[in-house]
Amino acid sequence: MDPSDPTSQQPYAPQPGQPTPSQAGSKLLSKYSDTEHLLVRSGAAPVASTSSKPVIPLRRFQELEQAIRHAPANPEPYVELGQIYLDQQRWVDAKRVLDTGVQNCPEWEPLVLMREDLVLHLASQTLDVARTQHAQNPSEKTRYDLDQAEQNLANQRIRVCGDRYTRRPDEKEILVIWAVALRQLGRHDEAIDMLTTAAAEPELRARASLQLGMCLQSLQRPLEALAAFRKASMYRSPPPDPKIQQRALELATDVAEENRLIDSARFYAQQLLAICSSSERESVKRRLFQLREKEL
């Protein structure tokens, strides 16, 4: 073995500062929020940071590629090389490495998580492009492309959540994300079953109840939806996230008014007034005034 040859076979060794495989994990699925009608990103962060692209010596790429060729059943080089490509936003190269890694090391969880996150990220990128194109040039074609991109992302989330929950059945939060994607595709009954299970977990019950109310609302079951929104907004321990509480109160007010439950609508609007931001206070006050003027 010639030590001056950077492609000569070397035992794999992580670079200093490189996350170990046990530290590598899911970075994208946790970036999603479910307080709106669709599962949308709560931040602009993709699979890896886009603030700067680290400069990696060419020798390191060669070492990792060589390590993969000589020991394809060792998952660690795939994780490191895949993370390098993700950090540099080289999505095609990252997918190639992670696809091969999962094929050769299907039981290595950090590698599987990275590939799942990349699949979601690429589908999200496609959706972003479709949204931009439709906004710039509205037409039947761009509308169709947008619909297809939305459905593709939802289907990818369903697949990833299903696989991930099979591996991690104790992580009930996956059920909420899974249910949101199902709801987006109109599969409300399946979503309701998952959300009912998730709502039994104290830390998830506000989120799950909000989504449950949305499903019931879509199924034209307003009284059940109203009860779910009420629960989502008024749990005491633990209290709901402020965004979830506000969204639940907004929807509860709408459902109550639409079904001529004016006293209830006034109550929810009053609760909403107490928690809304200063920029929203005037509009909520007007809504409350209109409700007070309505006959019971």
Image: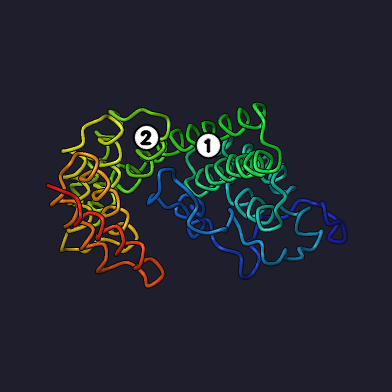
> Where does label 1 land, which residue?
153
| Alpha-carbon span between mark 1 and mark 2 | 13 Å
- Mark 2 crowd level (few <14, some 14–19, many ≥20, 10 Å Cα): many
Vertical placement of 28 versus 286: above or below? above
Q: Quick check: 195 left or right of 263?
A: right
Q: Which mark sits nearer the N-terminus, 1 or 2?
A: 1
At 80% from the left and 59% from the top, the residue drawn is: 59
Cβ atoms under marks 1 and 2 closer than 8 Å: no
Q: Amino acid at mark 1?
A: Leu
Outermost residue to the bottom: 278
Amino acid on which disc 2 is placed: Arg
Viewer-closest of 205 and 163: 205
Q: Which residue is mark 2?
A: 183
Foreground pick, 19 / 204: 204
**Residue 292 visible in rendering:** yes
Residue 198: image x %, image y %? 24, 45
- Please give the name of the residue rendered at 54% of the width and 32% of the height, measured from the top-left corner: 152
Give the percent coordinates (x, y) of residue 1: 82, 53
Does residue 146 sit above or below 31 in this rendering? above
| Residue 66 image point, x, y percent | 75, 48
Q: Is residue 258 above or below residue 291?
A: above
